[in-house]
């Protein structure tokens, strides 16, 4: 019986692929156990227990993007986090990392204990934590082709889909038009009005929310329905007309299916789930980081299923001038989703099994 430790906490972009791999692992290896590493402030505290997996907490190592006095605490915080990770990983057979704050100390702990490491990189431009982990392993998988560095030689596995998204993709293949109409009705929106689904990632976006608030009068005048996921940390606006604000969308598969147009950040998970179920998107990449969100959306733009605008350009004036043309373009986008990521979790499980035998 093997013990698999998975590290990928913080945001849904790190957690959801890890959960998909854990589900596939126990399906393939029912006598094995999967343990997640996380911090007390991450979404993993909700998502991991809800999925039925054990969660062990480690201290969070915060590294600000700009130099500050907080950098003086990094060595002590990192040592504490590595030691906490080591208590779990030294008893494990393999570590599977997905990037983010949790992964870096986990990779160091696995290297110290000589525990095999498998890494999955979701973004088209690898993050710093996974670049660190790649120093200690050759068992690498990526969601998108990477042009340079060690990840350019990684297994092209795609990005593991959440179970509800994967199931919806499979079920919709018999009749995509009917699946989209049924999803719109389940969400409580009329079938004869265009639906725009807006979200700013798993935690919401105050910048996107502010633009949408200024655009509601125009949307209502045009008879456009709006499902707006504002994020759990943001104030919930008042519903009006066809505008339905929610803190978080639980039925994400239905939201992707039902929407004629999606306005969202272009995180790796969002792009993968949209590719599986969505029709047309306007992506507003997060303006911080290493530019990975622009790269994530590039293949969808090339396929004619999305366009990209910078956050500075994304204004209520832009929406007023372009919402009609965006919805018109959406009607000409492919009606069917793409099933390319359906086998992703299986590929990562196979790579992990290979690492265990190496």
Image (cartoon, rainbow, N blue to C red):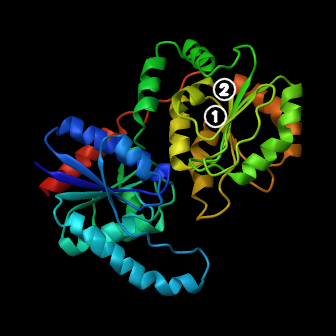
Q: Which label was assigned to residue 305?
A: 1
**Quarter where residue 355 is shown:** bottom left
Q: Quadrant of the C terminus?
A: bottom left
Point 23% across, 64% down: residue:
88
Point 36% across, 48% down: residue:
18
Is there CB contact under 8 Å for labels 1 and 2? Answer: yes
The answer to whether residue 227 is above or below residue 110 is above
User: Residue 165, percent across and down?
Assistant: 46, 31
Numbered disc 1: secondary structure = loop
User: Residue 189, percent across and down?
Assistant: 68, 19
Judged left or right of residue 335, residue 16 is: left
- The answer to whether residue 269 is visible is yes
Point 66% across, 26% down: residue:
333
Residue neighbourhood size for the residue with mark 1, other residues' Cα within 10 Å, grouped as few (<14), some (14–19), many (≥20): many
To which residue does mark 2 refer? 333
User: Residue 251, percent across and down?
Assistant: 53, 30
Which badge, 1 or 2, comes first in the chain's sequence? 1
């Amino acid at each position: 019986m093997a013990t698999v430790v998975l590290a990928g906490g913080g945001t849904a972009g790190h957690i959801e692929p890890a959960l998909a791999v854990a589900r596939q692992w126990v399906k393939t290896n029912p006598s094995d156990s999967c343990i997640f590493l996380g911090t007390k402030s991450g979404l993993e505290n909700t998502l991991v227990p809800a999925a039925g997996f054990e969660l062990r907490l480690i201290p969070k190592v915060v590294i600000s993007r700009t130099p500050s006095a907080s950098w003086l605490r990094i060595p002590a915080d990192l040592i504490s986090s590595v030691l906490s990770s080591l208590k779990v990983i030294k008893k494990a057979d393999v570590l599977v990392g997905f990037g983010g704050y949790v992964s870096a100390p986990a990779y160091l702990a696995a290297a110290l204990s000589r525990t095999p490491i498998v890494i999955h990189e979701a973004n088209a431009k690898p993050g710093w934590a996974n670049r660190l982990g790649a120093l200690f392993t050759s068992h690498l998988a990526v969601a998108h082709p990477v042009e340079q560095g060690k990840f350019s030689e990684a297994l092209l596995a795609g990005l593991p889909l959440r179970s509800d998204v994967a199931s919806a993709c499979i079920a919709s293949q018999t009749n995509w038009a009917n699946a989209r109409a049924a999803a719109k009705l389940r969400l409580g929106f009329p079938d004869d009005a265009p639906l725009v689904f807006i979200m700013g990632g798993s935690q919401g976006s105050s910048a996107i929310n502010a633009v949408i608030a200024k655009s509601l009068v125009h949307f209502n005048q045009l008879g456009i329905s709006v499902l707006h996921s504002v994020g759990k940390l943001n104030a919930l606006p008042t519903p009006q007309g066809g505008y339905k604000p929610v803190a978080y969308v639980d039925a994400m598969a239905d939201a992707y299916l039902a929407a004629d147009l999606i306005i969202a950040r272009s995180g790796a998970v969002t792009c993968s789930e949209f590719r599986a179920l969505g029709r047309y998107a306007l992506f507003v990449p997060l303006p911080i980081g290493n530019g990975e969100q622009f790269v994530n959306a590039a293949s969808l733009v090339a396929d004619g299923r999305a366009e990209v605008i910078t956050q500075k350009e994304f204004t209520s004036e832009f929406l007023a001038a372009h919402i009609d043309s965006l919805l018109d373009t959406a009607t000409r986008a492919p009606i069917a989703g793409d099933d390319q990521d359906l086998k992703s979790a299986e590929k990562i499980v196979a790579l992990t099994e290979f690492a265990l035998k190496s």
